[in-house]
Amino acid sequence: MGIENLREYLEEAYKTIVGIPDRKTRGGGGGDTGDAVKLRDGWADIEIVARIKESYFKIAKKKQIAVAIKILQLLGMARIDFKTIDLDVKFTRNKNDNLQTKAQAYSTLHGTKTLDPADSLEICDMTTDVVEVIDRGKKYWEEVAEKNLELQKKTQEVLKQDNGNNENNEEKVKENSAYKSTTYNNNMSKISEKHNKEKEE
């Protein structure tokens, strides 16, 4: 019995150190949901462990890149002043867990109008590449704004053409009305003259 307890203790200890979440089914029910379960069962700890390990991977990757840069500089294929400090190593990881809460938090932070969107994204932990996401979003909305502006210009041109056509139609109607009125008056004058001649005869 003592050995069994020791085994379970060591198993729990190494899971806590390594950051392995506890997948055991909790008996007796419980009302914990969402973030409470993540904190209780160690699912939040694995994110912390991943961040710590990621920093070591970045250090190793930058050393590897430094060797490649040096070789390229000796071959004349890279600038002499080019260094690893000019690069940033990033690891793409899935950040879609609890996305609704993160989106609400981002909306609230951005709505305060005190933080940069990049800082808001980083605080909410929605992506591992904040700068690239912000740049892509900025480029997208600039393109949308340009398309909307072009559409407004085209709409205004069409309206101007329609107004011009309407004015021309009105002028034609007026001309036709004047012509009809003149024709009617001339005809009435001729009829009157004819009628007067007949009376004289």
Image (cartoon, grey):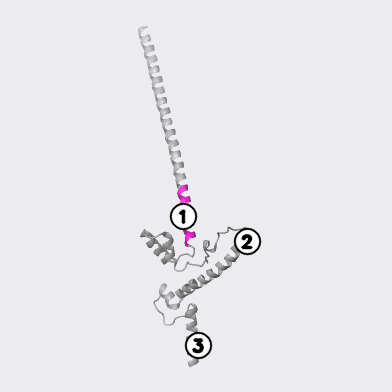
Residue bearing the label numbered 2: 74
Question: In the figure, 119 relative to 10: above or below?
Answer: above
Nearest-to-viewer mark from 2 and 1: 2
For mark 1, what is the residue?
Answer: 138
Q: Is residue 23 visible?
A: no
* Residue at 45%, 78% in the rendered image: 41
Where disc 1 sits, the SS reads: helix
| Cα distance in 3D space between marks 2 and 1 | 38 Å
Amino acid on which disc 3 is placed: Arg
Q: Earlier in the sequence, mark 2 or mark 1?
A: 2
Between the residue at mark 2 and the residue at mark 3, the CA separation in whole angstroms equals: 56 Å
For the record, the magenta segment spans 130-146
Residue 86: x percent and y percent? 52, 61
Q: Specify the amino acid type for callout 1.
A: Lys
Can residue 42 be seen in this snapshot? yes
Q: Earlier in the sequence, mark 2 or mark 3?
A: 3
Q: Residue at x 37, y 9 (%)?
A: 197
> How packed is label 1: few (under 14 Cα within 10 Å), some, or many (20 or more)?
few
Give residue 120's position: percent from left, percent from top: 41, 62
Residue placed under numbered mark 3 in the picture: 7
Give the alpha-carbon distance from disc 3 to disc 1, as whole Å.
Answer: 54 Å
